[in-house]
Amino acid sequence: MAPKLYKLDVSPPVRAVYLTAEALGVELEHVEVNFPKGESLKPEFKKLNPQHTIPTLDDDGKIIWDSHAIIIYLVSKYGKDNSLYPEDPYERAVINQRLHFESGVLFALIRAIVRPMVTKGVKTIPEHLIQEVFEAYAFLNKFLEGHQWVAGDQLTIADFSVLSSTTSLNHIAPIDADKYPNVVAWIQKAEQLPYYKVNQKGLNDFKDLVERLLS
Ligand SMILES: N[C@@H](CCC(=O)N[C@@H](CS)C(=O)NCC(=O)O)C(=O)O
């Protein structure tokens, strides 16, 4: 039985799971949870995940949420090898750092900017948050200095996680190629992955959502 993924394409962490599943060749059964319409707050979903966040995975009754936990689980359980999350302690530590960067910085900024727009109808983005997004691009640009991918020279789950939110933030605060050339080159490389399209559809939805909320 295919693992069930509770999802909505617009969500960046959901798209990190899509990219990981595609890279691994794991088929997922998709269950839509339209959180902007309040569906994540339904009692049956809260029973599965009291934190009521998507993505949430149900693998034969084993419930896992938080995209970072899910993508590590998918590689560990379904990967033919560990190349997307190598076992070497230092390589793994660097990947984990990038995953926490996604969670604590990139996604935290998306949440701080978009949530007031969705829940309170706020139509402006505070300048200090835009500056924080630029600071995050600068960090990412540094991580990528002299490297092909965000955690070194090998594609890992850190790329899928960081890519889904960075490409989303690009529709909030455009990434300047002159200031952050490594970030732009890395996104262009990722766009060549044969399964990149699984990020693109939800990214278009995200762009439309932000434009609609700001208009
Ligand atoms: N750190 C979490 C973030 C998950 C998250 O906040 N997802 C949002 C959608 S992008 C959500 O489920 N919001 C609905 C809710 O909190 O009820 C992850 O990586 O999975």
Image (cartoon, rainbow, N blue to C red):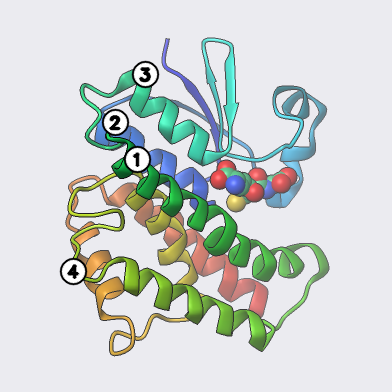
Position in image of residue 29 (x %, y %)? 45, 24
Q: Amino acid at mark 2?
A: Glu
Q: Amino acid at mark 1?
A: Arg
- The crowding category of the residue bearing disc 4, from other C-alpha atoms within 10 Å (few below 14, some 14 to 19, many at least 20), is few
Q: Mark 1 — residue? A: 92
Q: Mark 4 — residue? A: 146
**Real-space Cα separation, disc 4 to disc 1, in angstroms:** 19 Å
Ranked by sequence position, the earlier of labels 3 and 1 is: 3
**Real-space Cα separation, disc 4 to disc 3, in angstroms:** 32 Å
Q: Mark 3 — residue? A: 77
Ranked by sequence position, the earlier of labels 1 and 2 is: 2
Q: Mark 2 — residue? A: 87
Q: Residue at x 33, y 66 (%)?
A: 143
| Mark 2 or 3, closer to the camera | 2
**Real-space Cα separation, disc 2 to disc 4, in angstroms:** 23 Å
In the picture, measured across the screen, residue 55 lies left or right of residue 52, that is left
Give the SS element for disc 2: loop
Give the SS element for disc 1: helix
Labels 1 and 2 touching (C-beta < 8 A): yes
